[in-house]
Image: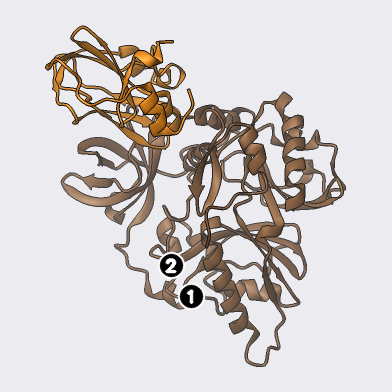
Chain colours: A brown, B orange
Amino acid sequence: MTGPRYTPLRERHETLGAAFTDFGGWMMPVRYSSDLAEHHAVRQAAGLFDISHMAEFAVDGADAAAFLDYALAGRLSTMAVGKAKYSLVLAESGGIVDDVIVYRLGDTRFLVIANAGNRDSVAQALAERAVDFRGADATREVSVADVSDAFALVAVQGPAARGILEAVDAIADLDRPLSELPYYAAAQGRFGQWPLLVARTGYTGEDGFELLVPAEAAADLWDALLAAGEPQGLVPAGLAARDTLRLEAGMPLYGHELSLDVVPAQAGLGRVVAADKDDFVGRSGLGAVVAGDAPVLVGLIGEGRRAGRAGYAVFDGDERVGEITSGALSPTLGHPIAMAFVTPAAAEPGTALTIDVRGTRLPVTVAALPFYRRAH
Amino acid sequence: MADLTALHYTAEHEWIAVDGDVATIGITDYAAQQLGDVVFVDLPAVGSTVTAGQVCGEIESTKSVGELYAPASGEVVEVNDDVVADPSVVNTDAFGSGWLIKLRLDGASLGDTLDREGYLALTGGDA
């Protein structure tokens, strides 16, 4: 692989004065001006995120639904057209290859959105599983195509998000009005001459939408959203704000809370696995890894302003009981928050623990996730 | 704003203003920008002594932690309590009201520092 990649919106970010950071092999805006201001804008009005680095896979065919039941952890075949579902790509071991969102675009048409950094491993997993699924005589029909480079994805997140989308004239012909689009559902329509998918999904804990358009339409869509949104408080927002927003919302980030060494139940994602399915990749591994002493994901709340960070040790008295996977001073709550894997004995909400912040022990309390839940 | 050409700079992205035997120390605008919004600073106590090249404090943003290195040995004679109370000043006025500590220097000189031109060459920035 050659140097870092840029999304179709690179010029827009540069014009806006963004600072860039490498994320999963992509140079992405980390902030435009102030990551705190961007964070607060999303909680109070709206933020516009370029998430075109994420990977998209088109899964099509008469047996596409059955294939996804086999290839992913959840039961996708019972999902209605126009719905979306959070799911996991599991390894045979039961560990997590990636977390994904699956959209059902038609009876035999699905879209799988995966993390940028896992594009290759998800592509490989889906391709191998398609071969196994079709069988030696290839009686079952499914195709998997990596369409990531053909599409751009932007997110409008925040309480003003719906009003902003409704103010963009070029967003038209939606098969459902946004006012009737439930959380984790998607409408198909047009942006100008281009096909558009609008999903009521996000990674911030706020109401919001993710918009998928052909890469050629990305800049026009970005401009249209900013123009319509600025009077309603919309600001471009970078990955720094995205990270503190998702942390407050208790949402896992692959490579931090999720990895090949973590099985779904450890990360509080047992509900995502449809264990009663006949056969799916990861089933045998999940059966084996039900160790009662496996660390589990918890929230930690601190005092003052000094935050624990990924990799810092967690203690119960003198005993090391776990490790932080993500942590920051919560911009919304004003105190430090973190997610950590700790032994089950230390995982009860309310348990008093300490964290080692560069040589200093600081008190924390175990808390249920999420840290932040929107009021409406 | 301070006269940036009159300041000394270090490779750890700190600036130093020397007045007699007292040095005022802060981090550069470049460092502040790299950190992102500063949300917490941990500074040495007034009266404590610091040693050149050693870590004497921390500057945390939402995303990362930066260390404050003592650019010279000496006694801490003042810390900027306004920055402790409102760390965002480091972002908005890194060379002015965002100063961090004042040292009474042990030695006569600072040792190796960079001038403005040398520092800009280091960061690839423009004046």
Where residue A95 is drawn, which disc sits there?
Answer: 2
Asked where in the image residue A110 lies, by quadrant, the reply is bottom right
Asked where in the image residue A87 lies, by quadrant, the reply is bottom right
Q: Residue placed at 16% from the left, 15% from the top?
A: B105
Q: Earlier in the sequence, mark 2 or mark 1?
A: 2
Q: Residue placed at 63% from the left, 71% from the top?
A: A68
Q: CA distance from mark 2 to mark 1?
A: 10 Å
Determine whether the residue tagged by mark 1 lies in a helix, strand or loop.
helix
Q: Which of the two residues, A42 or A241, is positioned nearer the viewer here?
A: A241
Residue A184, given in percent of the width and then of the height, sits at 66, 51
Q: Residue placed at 28% from the left, 52% from the top?
A: A322
Circle 1 residues within 10 Å: few <14, some 14–19, many ≥20: many
Circle 2 residues within 10 Å: few <14, some 14–19, many ≥20: many
Q: Which of the two residues, A216 or A163, is positioned nearer the viewer here?
A: A216
Q: Chain of mark 2?
A: A
Q: Residue placed at 29% from the left, 43% from the top?
A: A351
Residue B122, given in percent of the width and then of the height, sits at 38, 33
Kindly give the residue lying farthest to the top in the view shown: B20
Three-letter code, disc 2: Gly
Three-letter code, disc 1: Arg
Determine whether the residue tagged by mark 2 lies in a helix, strand or loop.
loop
Question: Do marks 2 and 1 share a chain?
Answer: yes
Q: Chain of mark 1?
A: A
Q: Nearer the viewer, mark 2 or mark 1?
A: 2
Asked if one can make out residue A376 in the rendered structure from this viewpoint, the answer is: no
Residue A22, given in percent of the width and then of the height, sits at 49, 48
Q: Which of the two residues, B45 or A107, is positioned nearer the viewer here?
A: B45
- For label 1, the residue is A283
Q: In the rendered view, tell whether residue A315 sits above or below residue A126.
A: above
Q: In the rendered view, tell whether residue A273 sits above or below residue A188.
A: below
Where residue A106 is drawn, which disc sits there?
Answer: none
